[in-house]
Amino acid sequence: MGTLASVLEQEGFVTIALSSIREQTVTTAPPRALHCEFPLGRPLGKPNDADFQREVLNAAFDLLHQPSGPVIIDYPIEIIDDADAPLSCTIPPADTGDRNPAAAEALGLLPAWRRTNEKYGRSTVGKVVTAEQVPDMLDLFTRVADGEAWEEVGIPGDPTKIAADIKNFYEEASISLSETPPSARSAESWFVEQTQAGSVIQKARINMKEAGANFYFWYYLLPMTQHHEPTNN
Amino acid sequence: MSDKQVRSMLSKLEGHKFDAVPWNEPEPLAESRVAIVTTAGLTVDGNADWNAGDQGFKIIPKNADDLTLAHYSPNFDRTGWVVDKNVVFPIDRLNEMAEEGIIGSVADTHVSFMGAQPDHTLETIRLDSGPAAAKALREDNVDVVLLTPI
């Protein structure tokens, strides 16, 4: 971000960069930066809070009065995330048939996911698979969690992208199942700690790591906030 | 592990710094045309899959209403984006500020790159895609660029 700001300033624009990671902003030295201690993924701080977002923008545009740079101003309000506080929401029962529990759980969440998609019109599912394919993908990851080699179960693409589709599907479903929009990372925490699917992906991740899979494939299977390693005793 | 701990871990990542920090004097904000350049990996064609290492960019038209966040990294919250695009791409806020006369105008052309690039030298962005994005912004007479990170 800092480097990109300098590229654009050099091209003749006046740039103002919002900053999420202060030391990186110091390292890359953009001309003007407003550093905000907000959770990653929410550079304006609070969704659905126009007043808060406007205050951040006002502080950003105030940097135009700085006489020289590089300059970093710290925004005075910090927002704490909820990576360790799972969202509270109840998973609807599904018509499971003979599906494995994770796939059945995902089938039960499809209506909630569709409600979110209809209401907000934005989804981050679809890197490799659709929401409707998530239950089938959980069948495959369940086999990896149960000990089969990940290359041999027929995962139809980059496993990190399919795991992202699964996680994003769950998070988007949770938005319709909770009474208020999730605080930062609370839906992620709910997915990993309180759903069958999250448990399956965690076990698959650990098995892939222990089997010597390429770092990229096991490391990016879940957010680094949620890498819970098994204890040995 | 909290988001704050993640940010702390990522603070030691290498980055590219220019030998001399460039600096342009701004015109009055109320006369300036403002564009957003984000590193959220936004697309307008429904493609949700932006590969790690791809230092290209997408043009985001001002009135695009079908944005997809296609960033590869799992290490940030996406639910805020789903319920309110402005938490990443504050286009509605800029439109309000233009209507109120605080900023001169909102550009028709905005830009998305993708952050968390494995190549910290950002050579392609510095030498190729960055200048190409600048050309598109210049053609829209943009004065001020607001950068929002992911």
Image: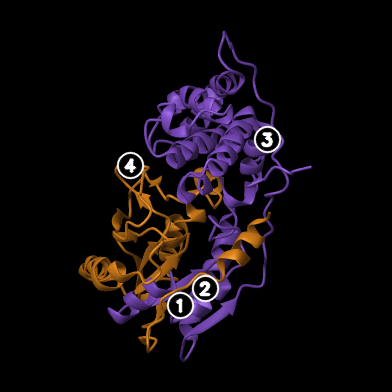
Chain colours: A purple, B orange
Cα–Cα gap, marks 3 and 1: 40 Å
Quarter of the figure that contains the N terminus of chain B:
bottom right
Q: Tell me which numbered mark, 3 or 1, is placed earlier along the sequence.
A: 1
Cα–Cα gap, marks 3 and 2: 36 Å
> Which numbered circle lies on residue A24?
2
Query: The disc labelled 1 sits on which kind of residue?
Result: Thr
Q: Position of residue B80 (x, y in %)?
A: 55, 48
Q: Residues within 10 Å of mark 3 (few under 14, many from 20)?
A: few
> Which numbered circle lies on residue B47?
4
Q: Which residue is mark 3?
A: A179
| Residue A181 can be seen in this image | no
Left or right, A184 with reference to A65: right
Query: The disc labelled 2 sits on which kind of residue?
Result: Gln
Q: Residue at x 58, y 67 (%)?
A: A55
Left or right, B127 with reference to A51: left
Q: Which residue is mark 1?
A: A28
Where on the picture, by quarter, is residue A189?
Answer: top right
For label 3, the SS is: loop
Cα–Cα gap, marks 4 and 3: 30 Å
Cα–Cα gap, marks 2 and 4: 29 Å
